[in-house]
Image (spheres, rainbow, N blue to C red):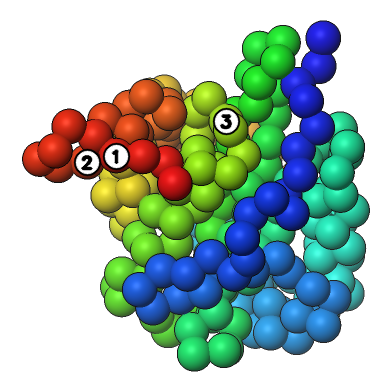
Amino acid sequence: MSPSAVDFGAVPWPVRTRRTSLRPVRPDDREAVHAHRGLDEVATYLSRGPLDLDEVAERIASDLARARPGHPEPLLGLVIEVDGAVVGDAMVRLEPDGPDGWAAFLGYTIHPGLAGSGLATEVAEALVRLCFAYLDVAVVKADVFVPHRASQRVLEKAGLRRVAEKPAGSDGDGHPRMDDYVYAVTAAEWAASAPGDGGRSPG
């Protein structure tokens, strides 16, 4: 038995945080996404090197295909906007978790000019809420390179905890990469984690 099909259209777009707005990526976002995905500084802690415009376009096309209902490898590609300008991108990738459920894997990238602004924490928290409120997943996970302490702090603030370490492999271009920490939070842990009043609703 396979998990039921995912409908990303059930999410009420855009998803807003205090300062950002998240929406599904579009083909005409190519140049805006390339503005940060083409930077060496951004690629340092990602699974592959900087992307050129054609590679960004291919990535967007793949994200759009995988976001369609019924795709066997669901993935939701998003852009992060501040005051209408794209400042980063994010994704939610789903993988089967048992015979009839999904686990969500998060990823996000913010333009380095906004490093330290707290935007990444807002985005990570919004992605976790989105997954539990609208995608009915059992657990939310994220991988982060061991040296990337700033991203680890973001995940911890968003309610995830370190659960495992994965040995280094190679990136999408075949180059050696760093060891990963795996972070995760279950739906029950997340619902119970609000301070003070005994928990929170995913919605």
Alpha carbon separation for disc pair 3 and 1: 16 Å
Q: Secondary structure at mark 1?
A: loop
Q: How many marks?
A: 3
Reading the image, the residue beneath label 2 is 194
Question: For this rendering, which residue is in front, 21 or 112?
Answer: 21
Disc 1 designates what residue?
Answer: 200
Q: Cα distance, mark 3 to mark 2?
A: 19 Å
Q: Secondary structure at mark 3?
A: loop
Closer-to-camera residue (196/52): 196
Of 177 and 4, nearer the camera is 4
Residue 28, quarter of picture: bottom right
What separation in Å lies between label 2 and label 1 (alpha carbons)? 6 Å
Q: Is label 3 in contact with label 2 (beta carbons under 8 Å)?
A: no
Residue 127, position as x, y percentages in the image: 50, 52
Q: Please provide percent x and percent y for residue 92.
A: 63, 48
Q: Please, what is the three-letter code of the amino acid marked with disc 1? A: Arg
Quadrant of residue 11 in the image?
A: bottom right
Q: Is residue 10 left or right of residue 90?
A: right
Residue where numbered disc 3 is placed: 137
Q: Where in the figure is residue 33, as x and y percent of width and height? A: 68, 77
The local crowd at label 2, few if under 14, some if 14 to 19, many if 20 or more residues have their Cα within 10 Å, is few
Tag 1 or tag 3, which sits nearer the N-term? 3
- Position of 135 relative to 16 (above/below): above
Q: Are marks 2 and 1 in contact (CB under 8 Å)?
A: yes
46 over 74 or under it: above or below? below
Under tag 2, what secondary structure? loop
Q: Position of residue 197 (x, y in %)?
A: 14, 38
Residue drawn 67% across and 42% down? 93
Amino acid identity at mark 3: Val
10 Å neighbourhood of mark 1: few (<14), some, or many (≥20)? few
Q: Residue at x 81, y 16 (%)?
A: 2
